[in-house]
Image (spheres, helix red, strand yellow):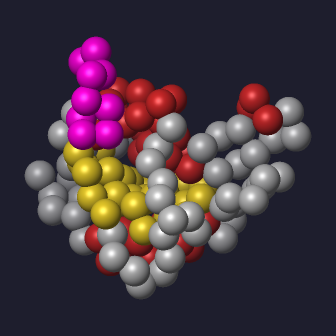
Amino acid sequence: MTSPDWEFMAEAAWDARENARVYGPTRVGAAVLCSNGRLFVGCNVEHRFRSHDVHAEVNALTTMVAAGEGPAVALLIAAERDRFTPCGSCLDWIFELGGPDCLVAFQPAKGTDVSVHRASELMPHYPY
């Protein structure tokens, strides 16, 4: 398994966040590290009919799958929020494509500390 370089992942996630297409106030970027060391990014892409929004985490994870890669070993989320965790739907994707030990990290601003949890800590009763 490749060990996450959180600084490198954060930079990639913040760069991807710049491409976010939003109607709401929160731009989100994500970077996913897969088991062979490749990195994939995504951003939130919002739709005027909000039920069609694509979250940054899912965007990055499905880009990994489209490239024929996986599983995910770490995911970093970049968003200007005090606290942030993936929604339940995104956690479903993280469990599906990374498993309960996938590391999920968050950075609230460039250059700040990164908080890291295992997916199983964020959703401890997931029916895995």
Q: Position of residue 97 (x, y in %)?
A: 34, 33
What's the residue at 41%, 34% (across, down)? Answer: 91
Q: Farthest residue in the top direction?
A: 127
**Residue at 78 percent of width and 53 percent of height:** 24
Position of 103 relative to 52 (above/below): below
Question: Magenta-highlighted stretch: main secondary structure?
Answer: loop
Q: Position of residue 26 (x, y in %)?
A: 68, 58
Task: Name the residue at the left extreme.
Answer: 1
Is residue 71 visible in the rendered image? The answer is no
- Left or right of 21? Residue 82 is left
> Residue at 24% across / 18% down in the picture?
128
> Which residues are drawn in magenta?
120-128
How many numbered marks does the figure carry? 0
Residue 108 magenta-highlighted: no
Is residue 118 visible to us here?
A: yes
Image side of residue 8 versus residue 83, left or right: left
Q: Determine whether, in the image, residue 44 is placed left or right of residue 92.
A: right
**Vertical order, 120 against 28 (above or below):** above
Q: Position of residue 51 (x, y in %)?
A: 75, 29
